[in-house]
Amino acid sequence: MSSILGTSPAVDSPDGNGKKGRPTSEADPQSGEPAQRPSRVMLAFRAFMRDRMAAVAAVILLLTIAVAIFAPVLSPDDPTIGDSGRRLEGIGTEGHVLGLDGQGRDILSRLIWGTRYSLSVAVFPVLVVLPVALLIGLVAGYAKGRVGETLMRLLDVLFAFPLVLLAIALAAVLGAGLGNVMLAISISLIPYMARVAYTSTVQESSREYIEAARAGGARTPEILFKELLPNVVSPLVVYATTLCGLMVVLAAGLSFLGVGIIPPTPDWGIMTADGAGVLLEGYAHVATIPGLAILVVALSFNLLGDGVRDALDPRKQTT
């Protein structure tokens, strides 16, 4: 039990007088006092920072979030209003750093506002589904029997469909629009995230510290939320972080197919679709700029997920 909770067992050891007492920590060579071992949070942070790619990805995502929050301040022009007399102007045009699209709208302004919409569609459903999937996985994985089997068999009906195809089908049924896209993505995520929580719960339920909690008279809610939850939530958070990258691509794909956010709302998928029509006419920047934004943000989420996974691995949490 103590090894799982990250504490050292109280083992008697001889001291300088030959008597037995508590084990001592390593001494500080300068002061001679016992050195304090860094907390698990600090060890995880150090392990994360050692992964340079993950650290860079975190900085990129923080900057992306800042752009989304301060879009009204950062945007130089209205992203939905264009100048019909100035269409498809290239990068470096005076007053328009990234040029103009096919309707004379400032690409930089649409890219900035698109950050807000694209991140919302990608991240918000993951955050909403995470606690729902965690609860389903905990209950189904710990209860097992009829309750667990019934819950998981119901989710397996949705799990049988690939995530992308399920999201496209739901978005087509619900109709285009920001709210409907978020709902379609949220429903599609539930079986996948619940399966991760369920698998982790089943694995943890057979460990000794759970048996010790049962033998100690702990009630089911205490076991679920005090013992299992801290150990199940870590792999689910790592999986959810990686999923955010996939959702950025999926949300853009839905808009590209016309079943996502409705134009002229600035969205990276809509911007890519607008640029696809003029791609072969020598105006590649209209489509490639939002495409690069999708690629960089999606890749950053994946690298961040890898970094979080390694940071939570006790084998890599060295002082």
Image (cartoon, grey):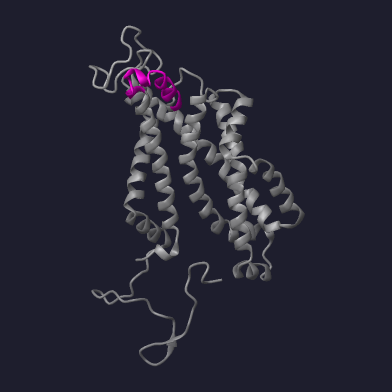
Of residues 287 and 233, the one drawn nearer to the viewer in this rendering: 287
Q: Judge whether 133 appears above or below 125 on screen.
A: below
- Determine if residue 61 is in view: yes
Whether residue 267 sits left or right of residue 143 in the image: it is: left
Q: Quadrant of the N terminus?
A: bottom right
* Quadrant of the rendered image containing residue 276: top left
Residue 107: image location, x then y, percent: 34, 21
Residue name at image x 53 percent, y 68 percent = 4
Seen as rendered, the residue at the extreme front is 280
Q: Is residue 34 magenta?
A: no
Report the magenta residues as a range: 269-286
User: Residue 250: where, in percent of width, then height?
Assistant: 50, 34
| 277 in magenta | yes
Q: Residue 191: which quarter of the image?
A: top right
Give the x, y percent position of residue 122.
Answer: 49, 35
* Towards the viewer: 13 or 275: 275
Looking at the picture, tell me which residue is in the foreground, 225 or 104: 104
Q: Residue at x 42, y 91 (%)?
A: 19
Q: Residue at x 34, y 17 (%)?
A: 281
State the image coordinates of residue 209 (x, y, percent, origin top left).
Answer: 60, 68
